[in-house]
Image (cartoon, grey):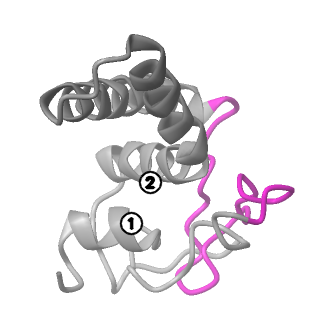
Amino acid sequence: MKKGNKLYSIFKFKCPRCHEGDLFESPAYNLKKFQKMPKHCSHCGLRYMSEPSFFDGAMYISYAMQVALIITVFTALNILGIAKLWLILTLSISASILLIPITFRLSRSAYINIFVKYAPEKRSEY
């Protein structure tokens, strides 16, 4: 993946406008701060939360990702022949819980990339 591609911004958690600034302040598994985002991009000045409750729509993306994850793990474990339903459910839900910080960040990153276009030359003052 290279800069200029939406997938680069989504999976590297970079600013959707310049692909330089970070979307999050700390690593994903710093559980006290995994959801903290700076107010503006440190490189181009893009304001990440353009309106109050902007990222509420990312909850739908996160929900879809979690459902897809649970179904995938459940199906894979069924194909592997693990016969006990309680074990399959426990492993599926455990995988979902362990990946919450990642799906949270991916959903926010994908959501902001829906609304902001790549324009590295653009700068804004905050």
Q: Taking 36 as reference, is 89 above or below it?
A: above
Residue 39 on the magenta span: yes
Q: Nearer the viewer, residue 48 or 86?
A: 86
Q: Taking 34 as reference, is 8 above or below it?
A: below
**Closer to the observer: label 2 or label 1?**
2
Q: Indicate left or right for 114 with 4 as reference.
A: right
Residue under the image location 35 percent in, 62 percent down: 10
Residue under the image location 48 percent in, 45 percent down: 103
Q: CA distance from mark 2 to mark 1?
A: 8 Å
Residue 16 on the magenta span: no
Label 1: few (<14), some (14–19) or many (≥20) C-alpha neighbours in 10 Å:
many
Mark 2 residue type: Ser
The quadrant holding residue 55 is: top right
Question: Marks 1 and 2: in contact by CB < 8 Å?
Answer: yes
Q: Position of residue 126 (x, y in %)?
A: 71, 70
For the record, the magenta segment spans 30-53
Q: Position of residue 69 (x, y in %)?
A: 34, 34
Q: Which mark is residue 16?
A: 1
Tell me the SS state at disc 1: loop
Residue under the image location 37 percent in, 16 percent down: 84
Residue with the most extreme right position:
32
Q: Which mark is residue 64?
A: none
Q: Position of residue 37 (x, y in %)?
A: 70, 60
Label 2: few (<14), some (14–19) or many (≥20) C-alpha neighbours in 10 Å:
many
Q: Nearer the viewer, residue 37 or 121?
A: 37
Q: Indicate left or right for 1 with 118 as reference.
A: left
Residue annotated with mark 2: 109
